[in-house]
Amino acid sequence: MADLKGRSEDAKDKVVGKGKEAYGKATDDKSKEAEGKAQSLGADIKEKARNLGDDIKEGFEDVKEKFSKKDDKK
């Protein structure tokens, strides 16, 4: 979770998107509802991409650590 600023922006976008979606439903404004859904979905996608990036970094660090331990035994 290195990118705290990006993650907080994603959370904000998700909340704002949900608000726009609710407003669109309440006012029967399909355009605003769709805009809110898109904004919320975009935030979800960015969050998943950040999580995947973190998982890849952690996996790489684990592999790197295992190889460095093997080198130390020689």
Image (tube, rainbow, N blue to C red):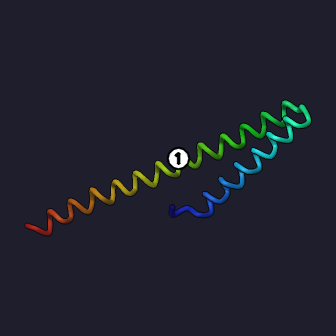
Q: Residue at x 51, y 63 (%)?
A: 2
Query: Which part of the image, by quadrant, shows the C terminus?
Result: bottom left
Give coordinates of residue 20: x percent, y percent. Answer: 81, 43
Q: Residue furthest right?
A: 27
Please name the residue that numbered disc 1 is placed on.
49
> Residue placed at 61% from the left, 57% from the top?
7
Which of these two is toward me, 11 or 26?
A: 26
Q: Residue furthest bottom?
A: 72
In the rendered image, the residue lying farthest to the front is 26
Side (left or right) of 60 relative to 3: left
Snapshot quadrant of residue 67:
bottom left
What's under tag 1, amino acid-wise?
Ala
- Residue drawn at x 65%, y 46% is 43
Q: Quadrant of residue 37?
A: top right
Q: Nearer the viewer, residue 23 or 49?
A: 23
Q: Residue at x 21, y 64 (%)?
A: 68
